[in-house]
Amino acid sequence: MGRQAPDVRAGGSVAAAGRPVAWNAFVFNHRIAAGNDGVHQVENGIAHTVQHFPHDNRIDIVLDGGGTVSLWWVTRAEWEGLIEVAGLEVEGLYGGFDREPFDEGAGEFVWVVRKPL
């Protein structure tokens, strides 16, 4: 299964109505991923091993009982490109929904965009 770009078109149609649109996505932390790579873990009773594939912007969570969950991450530059292609302008980028500053310690992107008038 290949990586698919997030679709920002739905946000564009809402933003076209003149209202800002907000969404969040996690900020990938390479240090945490590298530290967890190949380590067997049990969280909330679910035994699994995390595999880190930085060349593919992906981590796989391999469940002991069978099955794999793949997560792909999008970089800030990729988000900015998608927003531009969608014809939106950024009103704000925050590190949380309480408008925390987006800085090196931010664990998530919170984008607020609008269709230019």
Image (cartoon, rainbow, N blue to C red):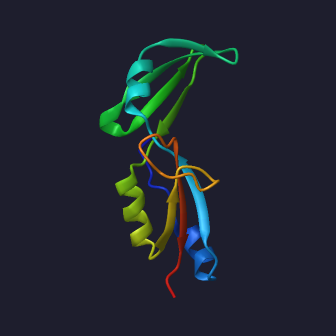
Q: Locate residue 13, reporting x and y percent.
A: 59, 76
Work out whether residue 59 can be spotted.
yes
Q: In the displayed image of the protein, which residue is found farthest to the right?
A: 45
**As displayed, is residue 32 above or below residue 93?**
above
Residue name at image x 58 percent, y 81 percent: 16
The structure residue drawn at horizontal position 70% and vertical position 14%, both measured from the top left corner, is: 45
Residue 73 or 2: which is nearer the viewer? Answer: 73
Q: Is residue 7 visible?
A: no
Number of numbered discs overlaid on the protein picture: 0
Q: Residue furthest front?
A: 101
Q: Quadrant of the N terminus?
A: top left
Q: Residue at x 38, y 27 (%)?
A: 31
**Above or below — where is 17 with respect to 82?**
below
Residue at the left extreme of this rendering: 55
In this orientation, which residue lies closer to the viewer: 99 or 60? 99
Please say if 96 is above or below 47.
below
Q: Position of residue 10 (x, y in %)?
A: 59, 68
Q: 76 left or right of 45?
A: left
Question: Where in the figure is residue 71, as x and y percent of width and height?
Answer: 49, 37
Give how far across and how far down residue 63 sits, in percent: 57, 19
